[in-house]
């Protein structure tokens, strides 16, 4: 048994999975609260990554600090999109199908805008600590991965406490659990949905920065990230923040460990095989659906 | 008087027509007839878009040049390029559409190898000459008669130059243990045969030989294994995304083999631009290079420098240009747009391109082309064959700083 390989793969998997979690939390929220399957969620994540890249290139701003700019910007943009595009389709008979078609269109528009602004060139976030590592005995902890992990942990916890401890957050949960009762108690469902959508999209921006710490990216990369989003939500349960976070970690750990134990060409088969098994056994996810 | 007048007008008209016909051969503005339409598809979006944009730029520069000289067979050339969105299936659809619906005069070569391989049978079915990189050796062994690799980009030849260079080292200088990680697709797997032969011939033990499916989620276990097994040469046969992940992880985990060979991902400009110094000292191979001394390379380098502010043309810019050179020489040689005549001319004559002179065998392939390259100080340098060397190879690779 190769202990170092297993532990190193496990560490790497946890860090990778935590980033999937941050990217997936908002996707799970919009699906759970608003019944909107937000196909352009990953494209907004990618936009966050590109904004971080440009702020780093032109002003030398650390990608994590760049969130001070990109998170409010994405929140504002999401509110506008909600008001003008998403809200009208929530009246549709088949909200889920209508939302998928609409947000698929938004994803294509965003991809093309990113192509126009940043060109199809692949990009990497290269920061002062890109190559730095913390060595503990025989184990290596890469700084960018740790940064991604910390960003994700903070991001998921902030969303969790926002939903549990703030008045608006409680209203979001109420809207998810009992929309009619929430309305009777004075919760403005439209406003709550807009805040949820804004929160989800801005968390996608943060998740996109986390993904950019791990991977190169280009304007079409969101299609790949979207697959991980579905994986996180299906494993974690729709609308469940902590479930999505745990799902991200589980996927990361499974991927990391299977890379250590199995021939590499089996890894994706195993990960997506897992998705199918969960869909069959627990179609609502591993964890009970609750915001 | 009247008779004389008409005779003069007739004579002047004849002279005018003859003059315009002669001038029309050289002057694009006066070039006669409809333009020659060259159709097909490129991945303008999707995962191969970065590379394909340089192919398109190379093709368009060729068109600029040839139109300025009066066109092809005296006719201006124009492109009808579809975006196949990096899908080989769509590349076939668009090739069919270009031939049957648009009724283009000529077909241009697509990218990547998977798309080229898929288009080759369609070109054969419609009897259209198809000059491209090809889809590696197997695609040229299907009996197609209208397909040409002019020049090809053969995975099976990719490391030939590196192998020859490694062979030139004394046995004790060569690496002893190899780790090979290959993306599980036709491009990646086409590299494996040559690695097997190389390691066997040079007595290098193949300690790890694994394939992975794209996208590669994490390179950490790959590098940990290679380091633990003391592999002193790493073959990372992947595209850009998995390639940079492997390099960055190798650096982070302080894995220092004597040589890193990265087949495909390292040949695009983004490798140097985005990885910076970390991308240095990687070996690769090519059938085309901007420092080759064949006619045309200097012109291309000057153009790219002026237009894109790059020190020299990216390799795929050269490929786009060279494929059009081969096709146009076939057309000019055949003096016709008849596809069979073009094919027969190409099969029986030598073409002269920026990567040298090529004669095609019955499969449509030239003799194996094998240049070994190494990235040194952010530049792709030619290492082998020795007579075309542009820089001394850096070996063993310096340790990560």
Image: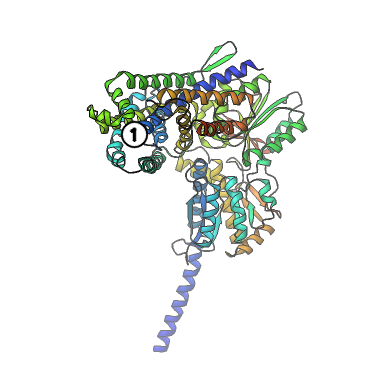
Residue B1 seen by the camera: no
Residue B260 seen by the camera: yes
Q: Which of the 4 quarters of the picture holds residue A29? A: top left
Chain of the residue that carries numbered disc 1 in the rendered image? A
Q: In this view, does B6 lie above or below B389?
A: below
Quadrant housing the C terminus of chain B: top right
Q: Where is residue A86 in the image (x, y as percent from the top left)?
A: 31, 39
Q: How is this picture coloured?
A: rainbow
Residue depicted at x 44% and y 18%: A150
- Mark 1 Cα shell of 10 Å, populated few (<14), some (14-19), many (≥20): many
Tag 1 residue: A34
Q: Where is residue A234 in the image (x, y as percent from the top left)?
A: 47, 31
Residue depicted at x 76% and y 26%: B171
Residues A171 and B164: in front is: A171
Left or right, A171 with reference to A47: left
Residues B351 and A22: in front is: A22
Q: Which of the 4 quarters of the picture holds residue A189? A: top left
Q: Is residue B92 above or below residue A26?
A: below
Q: Where is residue B271 in the image (x, y as percent from the top left)?
A: 53, 33
Residues B249 and A221: in front is: A221
**Tag 1's secondary structure?**
helix
């Amino acid at each position: 048994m190769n202990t170092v390989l297993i532990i190193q793969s496990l560490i790497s998997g946890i860090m990778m999975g935590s980033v999937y979690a941050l990217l997936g939390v908002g996707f799970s929220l919009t699906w759970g609260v608003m019944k909107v399957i937000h196909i352009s969620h990953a494209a907004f994540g990618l936009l966050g990554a590109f904004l971080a890249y440009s702020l780093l290139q032109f002003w030398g701003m650390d990608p994590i600090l760049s969130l001070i700019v990109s998170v409010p910007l994405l929140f504002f943009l999401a509110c506008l999109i909600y008001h003008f595009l998403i809200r009208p389709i929530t009246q549709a008979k088949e909200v889920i199908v209508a939302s998928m078609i609409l947000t698929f269109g938004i994803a294509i528009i965003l991809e093309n805008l990113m192509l126009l602004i940043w060109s199809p060139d692949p990009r990497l976030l290269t920061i002062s600590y890109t190559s730095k590592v913390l060595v503990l005995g025989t184990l290596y902890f890469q700084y960018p991965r740790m940064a991604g992990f910390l960003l994700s942990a903070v991001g998921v916890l902030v969303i969790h406490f926002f939903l549990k401890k703030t008045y608006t957050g409680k209203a979001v949960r109420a809207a998810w659990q009992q929309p009619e009762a929430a309305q009777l108690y004075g919760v403005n469902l439209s406003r709550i949905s807009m805040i949820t959508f804004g929160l989800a999209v801005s968390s996608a921006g943060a998740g996109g920065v986390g993904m950019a710490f791990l991977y190169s990216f280009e304007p079409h990369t969101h299609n790949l990230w979207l697959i991980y989003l579905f994986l996180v939500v299906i494993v974690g349960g729709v609308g469940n923040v902590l479930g999505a976070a745990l799902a991200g970690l589980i996927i990361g750990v499974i991927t990391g460990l299977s890379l250590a134990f199995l021939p590499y060409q089996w890894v994706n088969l195993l990960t997506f095989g897992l998705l199918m098994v969960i869909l069959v056994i627990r179609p609502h996810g591993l964890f009970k659906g609750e915001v | 008087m009247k008779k004389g007048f008409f005779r003069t007008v007739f004579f002047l008209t004849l002279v005018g027509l003859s003059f315009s016909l002669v001038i029309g051969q050289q002057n694009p503005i006066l070039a006669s007839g409809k333009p020659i339409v060259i159709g097909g598809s490129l991945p303008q979006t999707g995962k191969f878009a970065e590379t394909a944009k340089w192919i398109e730029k190379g093709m368009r520069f060729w068109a600029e040049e040839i139109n300025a000289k009066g066109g092809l067979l005296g006719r201006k050339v124009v492109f009808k390029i579809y975006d196949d969105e990096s899908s080989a299936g769509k590349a076939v659809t668009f090739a069919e559409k270009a031939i049957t619906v648009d009724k283009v005069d000529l077909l241009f070569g697509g990218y990547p190898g998977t798309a080229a391989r898929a288009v080759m049978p369609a070109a054969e079915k419609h009897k259209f000459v198809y000059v491209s990189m090809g889809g590696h050796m197997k695609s040229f062994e299907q009996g197609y008669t209208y397909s040409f690799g002019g020049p090809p980009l053969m995975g099976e030849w990719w490391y030939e130059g590196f192998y020859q260079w490694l062979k030139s080292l004394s046995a004790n200088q060569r690496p002893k243990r190899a780790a090979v990680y290959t993306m599980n697709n036709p491009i990646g797997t086409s590299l494996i045969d040559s690695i097997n032969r190389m390691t066997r011939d040079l007595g290098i033990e193949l300690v790890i030989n694994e394939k992975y499916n794209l996208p590669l989620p994490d390179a950490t276990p790959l590098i940990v294994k290679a380091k633990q097994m003391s592999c002193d040469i790493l073959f990372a046969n992947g595209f850009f995304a998995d390639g940079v992940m492997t390099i960055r992880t190798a650096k982070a985990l302080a894995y220092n083999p004597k040589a890193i060979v990265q087949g495909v991902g390292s040949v695009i400009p983004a490798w140097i631009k985005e990885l910076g110094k970390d991308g240095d000292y990687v070996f690769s191979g090519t059938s085309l290079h901007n420092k080759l001394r064949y006619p045309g390379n200097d012109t291309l380098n000057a153009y790219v420098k002026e237009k894109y502010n790059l020190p020299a043309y990216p390799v795929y810019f050269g490929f786009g240009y060279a494929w059009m050179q081969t096709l146009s020489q076939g057309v000019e040689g055949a003096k016709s747009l008849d596809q069979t005549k073009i094919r027969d001319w190409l099969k029986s004559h030598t073409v002269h391109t920026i990567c040298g002179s090529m004669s095609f065998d019955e499969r449509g392939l030239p003799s194996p082309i094998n240049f070994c390259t190494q990235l040194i100080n952010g530049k792709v340098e030619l290492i082998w064959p020795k007579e075309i060397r542009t820089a001394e190879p850096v070996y063993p690779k310096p340790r990560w700083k």
